[in-house]
């Protein structure tokens, strides 16, 4: 290492040098300065840095020019830190070590799957489908912990500290990155008991005579949209039952209270078993999608990318979910 002048220098001098003097520094030169000091010569520093001796000398001169202060005195035989060089080296060394410690601390978030994964998911889809898959995911990554919040209301991912969210329907926040997981088809249906009592509607005029079960958080408002014979038509349902929970609507339909519009991921087993009957096959409800959304694409933590890959495995085209819930009625 370059010899020290061994002066006793008050710490406040360093603060005056840094705080009271406006210095525009290329920070990539700092490791070069530190290496020169530690190696004690330009030749050894050049070997360590895999640079030529002349290139190291030019970088060192550029660093001193930027600071505006001579940091190292040179002779034919050795290099010597100046008084200012001693002070600056001691602080830069500490800063460089702190930066390296910080890099090591965050490296595990890019290279390993651990920490806490905070997830937001719709209440019913989460409890019916996502919840039963999480044990398998955690067995793959035993160092990871999950915190999942089930809520049909949209949450502020960044403001509330979520890593990822599952959302269904039209995406409203363009600042989020999204990945499509699956189609989400809905079906108009009612119980056999209701249809035996009120009859099977053949068109929207007849549907208007039925009690309709309404979902409070429906993104399109309280209007049902259909495509019929290539044209889009709208229908305003009326009924005596409104709820903000799809399972509540589901139970009401099973108990013969009226006609409901629900996702196939809820009602497909009931339709296959005959507990619910699909209606108006010539009137097609809009096709929505299930998405995974997350706040930041660059520097994506490994825990998030691992969960994204897992979700696509479980919900995408060739998955059991697709065969059991989305394609089962087609």
Image (tube, grey):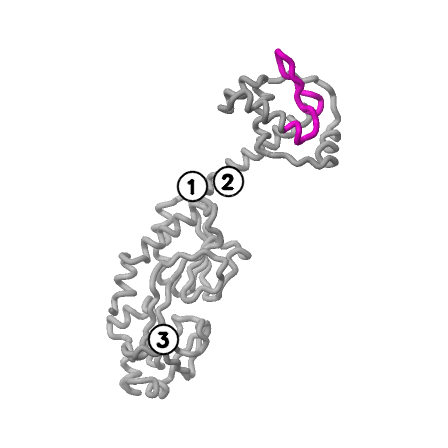
Numbered disc 1: secondary structure: loop
Query: Residue 245 placed where, x, y %?
Result: 43, 71
Label 3 crowd bin: few (<14), some (14–19), many (20+), radius 10 Å: many
- Give the quarter of the figure containing the N terminus: top right
Q: Which residue lies under the disc numbered 2?
A: 106
Q: Answer yes or no: do the residues labelled 1 and 3 have beta carbons within 8 Å?
A: no
Earlier-in-chain disc, 3 versus 2: 2
Please name the residue shown 35% across and 66% down the image. Answer: 184
Query: Residue 211 placed where, x, y %?
Result: 37, 84
- Give the camera-side residue of 56 and 166: 56
Query: Residue 22 placed where, x, y %?
Result: 71, 37
Report which quarter residue 95 is drawn in. top right
Query: Residue 294 placed where, x, y %?
Result: 46, 55
Q: Disc 2 to disc 1, how far (Cα)?
A: 10 Å
Q: Disc 3 to disc 2, how far (Cα)?
A: 47 Å
What segment is highlighted magenta in the picture?
Answer: 63-85
Location of residue 31 with respect to 115 vertically, above or below: above
Q: Disc 1 to disc 3, how far (Cα)?
A: 43 Å
Numbered disc 3: secondary structure: strand
Q: Which residue lies under the disc numbered 3?
A: 261
Look at the image and say whether residue 70 sits in the magenta stretch: yes
Look at the image and say whether residue 68 sits in the magenta stretch: yes
- Give the quarter of the figure containing the C terminus: bottom left
- Give the camera-side residue of 49 and 165: 49
Q: Residue furthest top?
A: 77
Please name the residue shown 38% across and 45% down the image. Answer: 141
Q: Which residue lies under the disc numbered 1?
A: 112
Give the side of residue 221 with respect to residue 285, left or right.
right
């Amino acid at each position: 290492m370059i010899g020290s002048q061994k002066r006793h220098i008050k710490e406040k001098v360093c603060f005056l040098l840094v705080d009271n003097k406006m210095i525009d520094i290329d920070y990539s030169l700092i490791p070069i300065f530190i290496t020169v000091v530690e190696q004690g010569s330009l030749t050894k520093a050049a070997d360590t840095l895999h640079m030529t001796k002349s290139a190291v000398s030019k970088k060192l001169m550029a660093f001193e020019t930027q600071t505006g202060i001579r940091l190292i005195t040179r002779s034919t035989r050795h290099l010597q830190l100046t008084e200012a060089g001693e002070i600056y080296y001691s602080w830069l060394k500490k800063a460089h070590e702190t930066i390296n410690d910080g890099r090591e601390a965050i490296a595990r978030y890019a290279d390993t799957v651990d920490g806490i994964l905070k997830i937001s998911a719709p209440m019913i889809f989460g409890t019916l489908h996502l919840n039963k898959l999480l044990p398998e995911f955690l067995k793959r990554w035993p160092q990871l912990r999950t915190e999942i919040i089930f809520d049909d209301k949209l949450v502020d991912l960044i403001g509330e500290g979520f890593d990822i969210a599952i959302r269904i329907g039209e995406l409203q926040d363009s600042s989020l990155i999204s990945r499509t997981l699956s189609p989400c088809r809905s079906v108009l249906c009612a119980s056999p008991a209701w249809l035996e009592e009120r009859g099977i509607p053949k068109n929207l005029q007849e549907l208007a005579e039925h009690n309709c079960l309404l979902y409070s958080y429906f993104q399109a408002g309280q209007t049902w949209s259909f495509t019929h014979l290539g044209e889009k038509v709208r229908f305003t349902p009326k009924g005596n039952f409104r709820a903000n929970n799809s399972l509540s609507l589901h139970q009401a339909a099973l108990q013969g209270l009226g006609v409901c519009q629900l996702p196939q991921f809820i009602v497909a087993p009931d339709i296959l078993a005959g507990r619910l009957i699909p209606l108006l096959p010539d009137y097609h409800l809009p096709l929505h999608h299930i998405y995974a959304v997350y706040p930041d694409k660059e520097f994506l933590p490994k825990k998030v990318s691992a969960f994204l890959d897992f979700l696509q495995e479980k919900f995408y085209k060739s998955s059991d979910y697709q065969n059991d819930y989305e394609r089962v009625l087609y």
